[in-house]
Image (tube, coloured by chain):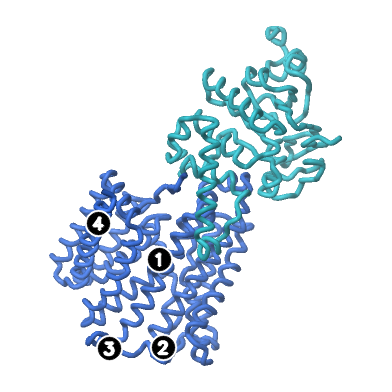
Amino acid sequence: MSGLLETTDLTIKFGGLTAVDQVTFRVDQCEIVGLIGPNGAGKTTFFNLITGIYRPTSGRILFQGKNTVGLPTFEIARKGIIRTFQNLRLFANLSVLDNVMLGMHNKQRSQWYHAIFWNSFAKKEMKEAAEKAGELLSYFSKELVEDRYKKAAELPLAHRRRLEICRALASDPVLLLLDEPSAGMDTEETFALMEDIGKIQERKKEIGIVIIEHDMTVIENIAKRVVVLNYGKEIAQGSFAEISQTPEVLEAYLGKRDADAEA
Amino acid sequence: MQGDRGYLDKVKIFFAECFLLGLFILFMRVEHIIGILILIFGMGACWYIYDKLENVQISIREILKREKIFSMILTFVILVCVPIFLKDSVYLLNLCIWAGIYVMLATGLNYQIGSTNIVNLATAASYGIGAYTSALISVHTGISFWLVILIAGCASGFMGFILGLPTLKTKDYYLTLVTLAFGLIVYLVLNNLEFTGGPNGIGDIPPPTIFGYSFRQDLHIFGMTLPYHVNFYYLVLFLASFYTLISNRLYHSRVGLTWNAIREDEIAAKCVGINTTNYKILSFVINCFLDGMTGAVYAHYVSFISPENFQFFLSVVVVTMVILGGIDNVFGVVFGAVLLTLLPEKFRVFQDFRLMLYGVIVIATLIFRPKGLFPQKLRKYAEG
């Protein structure tokens, strides 16, 4: 039985640099897989490959059994693969509500001719989207609902990260790719983030999640399985407990000499 | 209670709009340097107060929202009455028509510069292709103006599509350069092709007719005789209102929001499933189609066109109107178009300093208000 997402020997080279090196990866429905590795290991590049921002040099990507290599990014998003970004890519000058509504773009039907000649239809669709967006926001955060007409750029970091997750969920994803969602957060905010991810699973059980993280608390608590990359290659795979003892992983993070200090 | 407030709102709006009408007529009529300066400073002061006081903005917007239909109808009625106050001056009527034409061009360009952040420097080209298409068809065939204007729109719209195709491969500044080059090419083609009359252009373009009534006839109504320019004023008023309505509708629809998403972050837009190429091409086609119709109106108004009317400078002027008026703010763009049509004319009193003063105002606005006099407002939705 094929997984939700499967990559086989996925590779991308930028000139002489092999950023992702024959990575064979799999994530299933209802699963949360952690993707970790030192900076520059190729984790975000891997996400970029899956979402079609980069085209692989070689290897396969199958989503729900079908090939996605060569599809434009927006098509891949329409199939249900939605991501968040390491450095946040919100629509900064638009309101919180607008950001979430844009997540629903693919669910909507109105075109330019509706707007001009059948305006009531266009308006109605926007009104319904606004209501759904409000409901989605309220599921995650009262503050976001109160601030829904604030510019996204004016929110504090933790709220912006939460907003990006809300926007991602507004697209009704089948596979959710989270890229360092806890970066820049303190302990309290990180805890809230883990609760949010729990809420995501509650709201939609079949969703598959891949999460890139540097904060091992998060990985430990929510990832069922962990894949470790270093220099573009997969160096370990297993439960958190297993990989945190694997010598190659310790070496990747800590270097050869002080490997014992971790234990 | 509700009815009382509604009545009070209507009275406020009525007096405000009559006051603005008076101001407008005064501004058009005044010839004296001191008078013009006083008016400009006065308007600038009002704008400054409006801009600084959030509550004033909010209360004005509330009142207009509550009495939306009333204020729109009243505005339209007032604009219909304007020619009566200007019937003795063909010069001023012509100026109003020009303001309307620039409103049409600016609202179209706003879809690109304002909403999608595509700096399109080829407005003169799409405007010119519309004008020439309509002129050639009108001069060589007997097809009615009302069909010709649509054909001209289609011709320019098609040009917009061609111009938009490179968006697949080029972005931002490079795309701007492509539009710049395109504008120059169109000018050169118009200037050198025998078919389009070369530098001599096309003359004797027949005026539009409606039920046998020619637009070049003076208008006799309610015992007054209004010069034929009034016919074109009403045509332009009708079309400019329609363009403004379209702008508003597109802005508040999924299309406008999507354009803004592309402007804010194109990669994020793609990642939420937006086909950014299609939406960018759409902005080109809509802008150019509307420019084409505007060009047809222009050609049939002045009855003689030549390539000199469609040079790069015109594109720059329209870009300035959009940026100065307010990026992605329909009211701002309309205001900017009207202001930047009337100001250089009013500055004639300064004679040699006219264009310099105009330039100073534009530069000052760009330094202190790069988002324009009336920046984009956040969208609000009626929520249940």
Tell me: B50 left or right of B298.
left
Q: CA distance from mark 2 to mark 3?
A: 18 Å
Q: Amino acid at mark 3?
A: His
In which quadrant of the rendered view does residue B327 lie? bottom left
Looking at the image, tell me whether mark 3 or mark 4 is earlier in sequence order.
4
Tags 4 and 2 on a common chain = yes
Looking at the image, tell me whether mark 1 or mark 3 is earlier in sequence order.
3
Dot 2 crowding, Cα within 10 Å, few <14, some 14–19, many 20+: many
Q: CA distance from mark 4 to mark 2?
A: 44 Å
Give the foreground label among 4 and 2: 4
State the image coordinates of residue B316 (x, y, percent, origin top left). 41, 65
State the image coordinates of residue A216 (x, y, percent, origin top left). 65, 18
Tags 2 and 3 touching, CB below 8 Å? no
Residue B207 bears which disc, if any? 2
Residue B7 bears which disc, if any? 4
| Image position of B206 with respect to A136: above or below | below
Q: Amino acid at mark 2?
A: Pro
**Residue matched to label 3:** B220
Q: Quadrant of the N terminus of chain A?
A: top right
Give the foreground label among 1 and 2: 2
Q: Amino acid at mark 1?
A: Val
**Residue matched to label 1:** B318
Tags 1 and 2 on a common chain = yes
Check the rendered structure and report the hue given to chain A: cyan
SS state under label 4: helix
Tags 1 and 3 on a common chain = yes
